[in-house]
Image: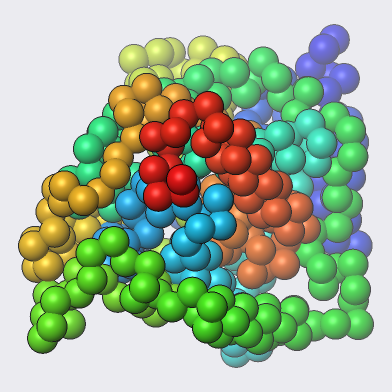
Amino acid sequence: DRMSEQKVYVVGKDNLLSKTATDDVDHNESAPLIQNIDENKKFSLKKTLKVLIPTIFMGFLFGLVFEKSRVFEPIHIREQFLFTKWMMMKMFLGAMTSSALVLGITSIAAPIHFKRISDMFHGCNMRGIFSSVIPGAILLGVGMALAGACPGMVTAQLGSGVDNAYVTLLGAIAGALVYGVMEPLIAKILTKGFYFKKFTLSDVFPKFKFWMFAFGIVGFAIACIILIEHFAPWAGELDVPNSQKCGVFGCRAWPPQVCGILLGLLQLPAIYFVGDTLGSSTAYSTVCSLSTYTMKTHHTERYFASFSSLRDSLMAWWQVPYLTMAVVGALSSAFMSRSFHDSNVVAPTPAQAFIGGFVMLFGSRLAGGCTSGHGISGFTLSMLNSVVALPFMFAGGIAFAFIYTHVDSNYAPHHW
């Protein structure tokens, strides 16, 4: 029958990913493409508190540094794709720097922790490169360019009072919901074609240890930050400059590269307390999984397996309070600098916000990760799927921005 013919992915002793169809595997046609096999799947008070307490701290800091970076402003995302401002790139490179440093040290000092978080990414390799990862990454970039946000950044926009941020949020939730419903129906398509049988660059080049790649990323990112800052100083890119003697938290903006470094350092509590790496888009699907609570269990597992795997998983739910506290962190930062609901912030229209949010989340789920999951975590873990996804995400955003700016002159007013 159809279920017994379905291809199932297994990891062999040689650490290669292969497709097989053995009788000892549960052949569920609607099984989610990414499954977290983990002893913390079930909730308990002790485990929940162990994860929740550091998550609250992480989320608050995430929102605060995003608000201080000013990268959350939609116009700055668009201007980055148009190469007129470089704030987003500096923050992204800063986050990659500290994330790679943390992961490189962890691979040496705590190999068990490193193997655990690295293994959690293996499910992403079940996706076809041309049928899932690349199309998803392009859609993610397009959605970011249209809405002027990424999945995690939406929370900073909400806390900062950006107009239509709630519309972007609704669009993102809709995108996650539609993908969750569609995934069982298109699972066979998403796993067709070429896929990586090895997981990381270290698997491809076994003579090189992971820490060599990680520290190489650190050096490359720092060099890029220095070069970009030389030609485009961060203070000169601010639409509204900091006031004199504003104080650390009273200042409207911090250097985006510093904010990125602080954000990337959140990998430390994520790895050692939560048992995961930084990511955001799963939170939207986890919230959508609540829609299955009124359904019978066998219906949920058969037709909404993607949501079923998230609904009762502690490792999926931690991102929800993380992003919720990011709203609080951004709100606190905005009030300290008196920049809440700033009229200088150019916001997307409601249509741009909703459609962009929808495309952004649908794309990130299709690609198996977002800017945090693929960019800050997956790429710095040298995961091959993330190495492919990241440039296509930027390519999608850049291409869309340059095309759309000729259609709508209000898309990025400063560009003209």
Answer left or right for 99 relative to 29.
Answer: left
Residue at position x 79%, y 64% from top?
A: 200
Residue placed furthest toward the front: 416
Residue at position x 75%, y 29% from top?
A: 190
Residue at position x 86%, y 50% from top?
A: 196
Whether 388 is drawn above or below 276: the answer is: above
Residue placed furthest toward the top: 1
- Where is residue 119? Give x, y as percent: 67, 60
So how many labels did they put on this image? 0
- Where is residue 199? Give x, y as percent: 79, 59
Of the pair 45 and 234, the residue shown nearer to us = 234
Whether 297 is drawn above or below 36: the answer is: above
Residue at position x 37%, y 59% from top?
A: 71
- Where is residue 310? Give x, y as percent: 47, 37
Q: Is residue 283 visible?
A: no
Of the pair 404 and 309, the residue shown nearer to us = 404
Q: Quadrant of residue 22?
A: top right
Whether 233 is drawn above or below 302: the answer is: below
Q: Is residue 242 visible?
A: yes
Q: Which quadrant, please, contains the N terminus?
A: top right
Q: Quadrant of residue 353?
A: top left
Answer left or right for 36 relative to 47.
Answer: right
Answer left or right for 375 relative to 155.
Answer: right
What is the basis of the colouring in this image?
rainbow
- Where is residue 85? Give x, y as percent: 47, 61
Whether 313 is drawn above or below 63: the answer is: above
